[in-house]
Image (cartoon, rainbow, N blue to C red):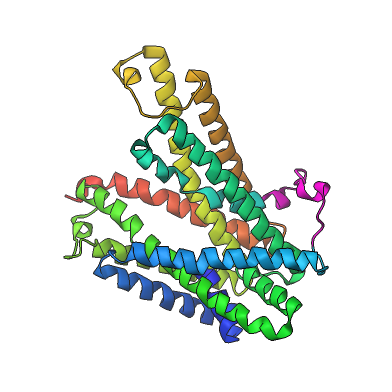
Amino acid sequence: MLYFLTGALSYVTGISAIQNNKYVKLVTLLVIFWGVLLTQLRGSRYTATIAKIGFAVGILLPAIVLFGLGFHYVLAGGQIHTPISLHALIPDFSKLSTLVVFVSFILAYMGVETSASHANALKNPRKEYPTAMFVLVILAIILDTLGGLTVAVTIPQKGLSLNTGVLQSFDILLSNINPGLVWIARIIALLICLGVIGEIASWVTSPSKALHVAAVDGLLPKYFRYENKEQVPVHLVVANGIVATIWAVVFTLSGGGSNLAFLIALSLTVVIYLMLYFLFFIGYLKMVINDALHKNDHSKKQRSYEVPGRIVGKVLVSGVGLLTSIFAFVISFVPPASIAANQHGIYEVSLVISFLIVLSIPFTIYAFRKHFN
């Protein structure tokens, strides 16, 4: 999100260094990040309101405008820069570098599992919850497809910036109607910036809240248990900020002003998140199999929602989820086709080392937990 912001600001201000100079880019994104983070130290009571307004004005509205302009562009006979046919819409499974696009698609749905905690609030969870999930997935696929196609048909692949492609698309779509309307694209870019900042605001404190629970349980040093009068775990928030800053330095300085840093950050986000999904699916499979074999009290509990199909349905759903996660995990380490051949080594080494570092941290902390109290 921060990489998108730097690209958007570069587009709006016309200062190319914000996007292309890695040092200017780093300073810009750190100023934005720490500015948002420090505002959250006074409490998150306004975060939900900011996020809602940001979503409506900075994400939903620009998306509707983008789709409308995209349809007009195609109907008006604008130049199409990507083939649109049944053959082109089916991925070429023989090319691993092309399949890496699956990674960003997976990322779009990560976090949907958090809705499960609200399933009991529904009148009929057994019927309404899976229905809501199917509707969500279908809508997300439609919106993602329309948004991606709009960018793809309007921008030549060689000139496409992965973190500012949507802004490039607005520029072309509006100039296709009337070159004098291009200034509107900059206003839309500012609105999108506000929407993204709203999302960042809702993200910067959430991990700290979860870690604070771990600190209270004695899994982190006492230093991290501190909360200010707004019940914000300040020490954890600042620690998270320092960690994020370190990663920003690593990715930005190694990837420069190209798409490389954006893709490394994207893939690292996915592989870290997938570790959680591995635990989800493996834990669920273990529970289902144990319940079926031992018929204990745990298996007799009445739950408001269960995966349909008894044990076969449960094993099938969780098994497909686990296999899909494993596939996404493996494919994440393959350099995307959009990365130049001479940068493949940087991508692979940076991603592998970064992942191993992140993976080792919780095990290291847990090994020393007895020394925290």
- The residue sitting at the top extreme is 294
**Is residue 342 shown to the viewer in this render?**
no
Asked where in the image residue 328 lies, by quadrant, the reply is: top right
Report the front residue among 373 and 105.
Answer: 105
The magenta segment: 82-100
Left-right relation of 110 to 48: right
Instruction: Give yes or no for residue 87 being in the magenta stretch.
Output: yes
Q: Is residue 161 left or right of residue 58?
A: right
Q: Is residue 189 above or below residue 361?
A: below
Residue 184 point in image, percent of width and height: 61, 80
On the image, the x and y values in percent for residue 356 come to 48, 51
Q: Nearer the viewer, residue 286 or 203?
A: 203
Residue 262, image x and y in percent?
58, 65
Q: Is residue 280 above or below residue 227?
A: above
Of residue 247 and residue 296, the one placed in the foreground of this image is 296
Q: Which residue shows up at 49% across the image and 76% down it?
A: 26
Q: Nearer the viewer, residue 61 or 24?
A: 61
Image side of residue 188 versus residue 124, left or right = right
Q: Is residue 201 left or right of residue 93?
A: left
Residue 112 lies within the magenta run: no
Residue 6 x %, y %: 53, 75
Look at the picture and state if 285 lies above or below 40: above
Image mark count: 0
Q: Is residue 185 visible?
A: yes
